[in-house]
Each structure stands twice: as C-alpha cells, then as structure tokens.
Amino acid sequence: MCARPPRIVSTDVGIDDALALIMLHALPGTSVDYVLATGGNVPVEAVAANCAYLKQVFDWPTPLFRGTDPPAPAQVRDAAHVHGPRGLGTLSPPPAELPDMAALSDLLRRRPEELDLLVLGPATDAAALLRDPHLGPRVESILLMGGAFQPRGGRLGNTTRWAEFNIHMDPRAAMAVIESGRPCRFVPLDATERRLFTAAELLPAAAGGPHRDLIQDLVEHLQTAHLRLGEGEGVYMHDVIAAAVRAGRVEAQWATTAIADIPEAGERRGMMVPDGPGAHPVRYAESFDEEAFLATWHETVAAL
C-alpha cells in the first residue's frame, strides 16, 4: 500500500481557517502534516501567532512554519474588519517565532513522497513551493478555497464585484498555480456561499467540550461581522467546507472550465477570466452536500 502524501495546509488564519484546522485535527481519519502560515486575512506575523495559539490550546503535534505576506498593493485591504484586528475575533495571541519556508522546503526535500497542498488563503506560498524544482514536480494534488466562476446576484466576488478575497490578494500566485500543470481544484464562492450557517445550527445547545466557549466566541464574532456587512444572519464556512471536501468527508458537485487570465491591476483585479488563448482547464465545486457538512461539523464539535 502506498504511503499517503504529506498534507501541507497553507492558511491565513482568520476565523473560518481556524475552524477548518480544528476540524482537520479533531476528526478520525483526517490529518495535517504541516501548517504553513500565510499572510492574508491579517499580516503573516499575526497568522503565525494564531497558528501557535491554536496548536497550544488544542495540543496539536503538527509542525508550524511561517510563510510570507502576499505582495498586494496598499489599496488592497486585509480582512481584519471581518475576522478581528488579529484574525481571531477579540483574541490577541502573543507573537510566535516559527521556522521559515526554507526550513519547510528542506524538510520536504528529505521526504520521498508526493505532496498534497490544501490552500485556505492566498496562494502566495503554494506558488513558491510549486516553483521549487525539487518539490513542484512532486505535488500530487492541490485544492484551493478561492475564486468565483459564476455570477451570483449580479456579482462574482465577495471583496469586489469581480473577485473573491484569496484570489484578489495575490492574483499572480493563483495564476501560477493554475499554470503549473499540477492537478488543482477550487472550492469557490459558487459553492461556499450557497448557504449561511447560523451559530445555533453550528453549536447545538448540548454539544461541545471544554473548548466550546472558544469556538462559540469565534462563530458569534463572524456572525456579527456578516450582519454588520449586510450578508445576513449566519456565517459562510468557506475554509471549513473546503477542508471537509479535501478530507473526503463531504461530497461536492464538480464542473470544468478554463481560465485564461487573472488580472493584477484595475477594478477587475483577481477576476478569474474564462476561455481565451492559452486558457488552462480547472475543476471547481458548484455545490456541496450541506447536510453532510453540518453533520461533519457537529462531529467535530463533539470530538473536542
């Protein structure tokens, strides 16, 4: 039997990233081998602190590494207005010194297996791994939470009219992943914004162990932000859905398209432009099994 490829999770911990990591570490049969802190929702130094905080609170054995901030221009803002000033609601974890990307690359070069990337934030660090001549050819699969393929309510994106946040933060890196030739799939807004989940749905009254209060605070902070932004009562579980799909716990319905470009400038920065010369085929989730997802999340909460 072949060994399972080491799973690297690149994440810009925010709240739904945190919930995704909690799920992946809590459920039987799921695993994370390395976590790579990538800037996005908040700067990378805050993401590194959040990863270290979660590892300590939940007693994870997973090695953590610090990546980089996306090279976004000053007018491209992060998502602290949604996730809290440091990315975890009202929490402010202390700074954490983590090994850098070079240390992760050295470690991976000493392992012979293929690699599996789960990208829950901007693709900045995933693209860097793919550029490594020793590691890029070994990437067996990539799943990214990000992008938007079909308009919803006259809009494509959630950050601008045209772009989803993760792609908007680093369009060049997202296009580099698509152009890499490695098998990649997207779990985009087309799927993740099909349903808002309320705090009551996500946290049944009798569920949860000693970490329930932390999870409830995070979910309620996100729900309050969604209400303030006029998105309705509930939360979009973007990264948690992507993680559940990648872990094989939730089925998605897939479609295929081709992406020719992702602009880096102008009002359509981050838009995934379909078709055209040199377009690259990609698969994306159009929808997901919502009830299976909710059951998987309830199993997560019960396991904590």
Image (cartoon, rainbow, N blue to C red):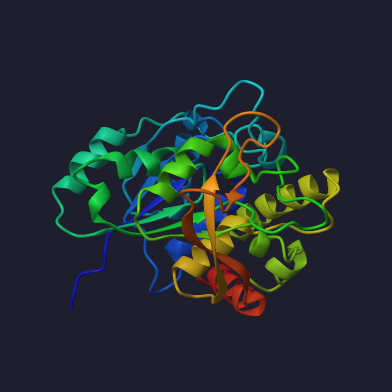
Query: Does any portion of residue 123 appear in the rendered image?
Result: no
Direction from residue 226 to residue 192 in the image, left or right: left
Give the image location of residue 53, x and y in percent: 47, 42
Residue 104, horizontal then vertical, whole percent: 26, 41
Left or right for 228, reference 44: right
Quadrant occupied by the N terminus: bottom left
Question: Which residue does the image show at 46% across and 66% down from the upper left?
Answer: 246
Camera-side residue of 22 and 190: 190
Q: How many marks?
A: 0
Q: Nearer the viewer, residue 64 or 170?
A: 170
Across and down, in percent, residue 287 comes to 64, 71
**Nearest to the observer: residue 112 or residue 212:** 112
* Position of residue 264 measured from the top left corner of the image (x, y, whole percent): 57, 32
User: Quick check: can you spot residue 37?
Assistant: yes
- Look at 70% across and 57% down and name the residue there: 236
Q: Nearer the viewer, residue 190 or 117?
A: 190
* Residue at left offset 57%, top offset 51%: 146
